[in-house]
Every structure is written in C-alpha cells, then in structure tokens.
C-alpha cells in the first residue's frame, strides 16, 4: 500500500508560481501629468485617468513620452458620501509601456509604474 504524506510538496517543484492579480479601478478622474516629453521639453498636460491600482496608473496623453521617462501625477479626488473634502493625490512613477491610440483624441495610452511613496492632502472647500 502506498502512502502519501500530505506535507510532501515534491510534485509542485518547478510548477509556475501563480501571482495574485492586483485589483485595478477604472476611475475617470481628472489628472495633471508633469515631466519631460520625448524631446526633453517640460510638459504639463491635463488629461483623465483611465485606471489605477496600487502599482500602476493608466492615462492618455497628447505629449509623446518615452519608456523609462519619469512623470508626476496630480489626481483630483472629488468629495463623496464617504469623503468630507476634495482630495489631491500626488504621486510619480516610471513609464513602462506606451500604446499608440488611433481611435482617440489623445495620441498615446501610457502605463506608469507608480513609486511606493505618495501624498494625499485635503483641499479646502470651494466657496460659493
């Protein structure tokens, strides 16, 4: 009679490791992108976030940027039922992938690998 030990994991050796997929949120929030374009010229372009996760942000740009470029993002987070004030998320990262956009008003879809550091600050309420 063959007995198999439950703690014997030899059958799993060499098996590909399953990575946990990160949750992405499709949030069309207004953002300001700052950095340098492909020619080294400083850019500040207002656009809209396509999606964001804890590690990556995706957005469209008219300015042409290169893979490896460092960009800063300022994301406007509106007041909601749960948030008492408007917030501003300040973060930055490195461009990891670019896709040319043919059916869009913007020229490029940019994937930005976010730095681990970020800052969230409340904005003062708008006076009416």
Image (cartoon, rainbow, N blue to C red):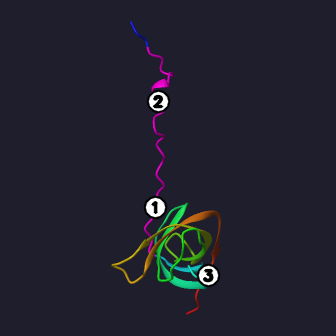
| Residue picked out by circle 1 | 24
How many discs mark residues in the rendered view?
Answer: 3
Quadrant for the C terminus in the image: bottom right
Disc 2 element = helix
Residue situated in front as seen by the camera: 57 or 67: 67
Residue at position x 46%, y 39% in the image: 16
Q: Nearer the viewer, mark 2 or mark 1?
A: 2
Residue farthest toward the front in the current orientation of the protein: 39
Could you say which is closer to the camera, residue 12 or residue 3?
A: 12
Q: Earlier in the sequence, mark 2 or mark 1?
A: 2
- In the picture as drawn, the residue positioned furthest to the left comes out as 103
Q: Secondary structure at mark 3?
A: loop
Magenta residues, dominant SS class? loop
The Cα atoms of the two marked residues, 1 and 3, are separated by 31 Å
Most extreme residue toward the top, as rendered? 1
The residue located at (62%, 64%) in the rendering is 115
Determine the residue positioned at 59% across, 91% down. 127
Q: Specify the segment rendered in magenta.
A: 4-28
Residue for badge 2: 12
Report which residue position mark 3 lands on.
Answer: 40
Can residue 50 be seen here? The reply is: yes
Decide: marks 2, 1 in contact (CB < 8 A)? no
Res. 67 image quadrant: bottom right
Using residue 107 as the reference point, say whether residue 82 is left or right of it.
right
Q: Is residue 86 magenta?
A: no
């Amino acid at each position: 009679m063959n007995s198999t030990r439950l703690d014997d994991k030899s059958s799993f050796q060499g098996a590909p490791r399953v990575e946990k997929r990160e949750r992405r949120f499709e949030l069309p929030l207004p953002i300001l992108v700052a950095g340098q374009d492909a020619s080294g010229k400083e850019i500040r372009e207002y656009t809209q976030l396509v999606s964001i996760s804890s590690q990556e942000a995706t957005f469209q740009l008219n300015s042409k940027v290169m893979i490896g470029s460092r960009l800063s993002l300022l994301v406007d987070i509106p007041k909601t039922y749960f948030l008492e004030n408007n917030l501003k998320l300040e973060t930055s990262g490195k461009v990891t992938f670019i896709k040319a956009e043919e059916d869009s008003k913007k020229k490029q879809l940019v994937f930005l690998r976010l730095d681990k550091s970020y800052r969230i600050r409340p904005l003062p309420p708008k006076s009416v």
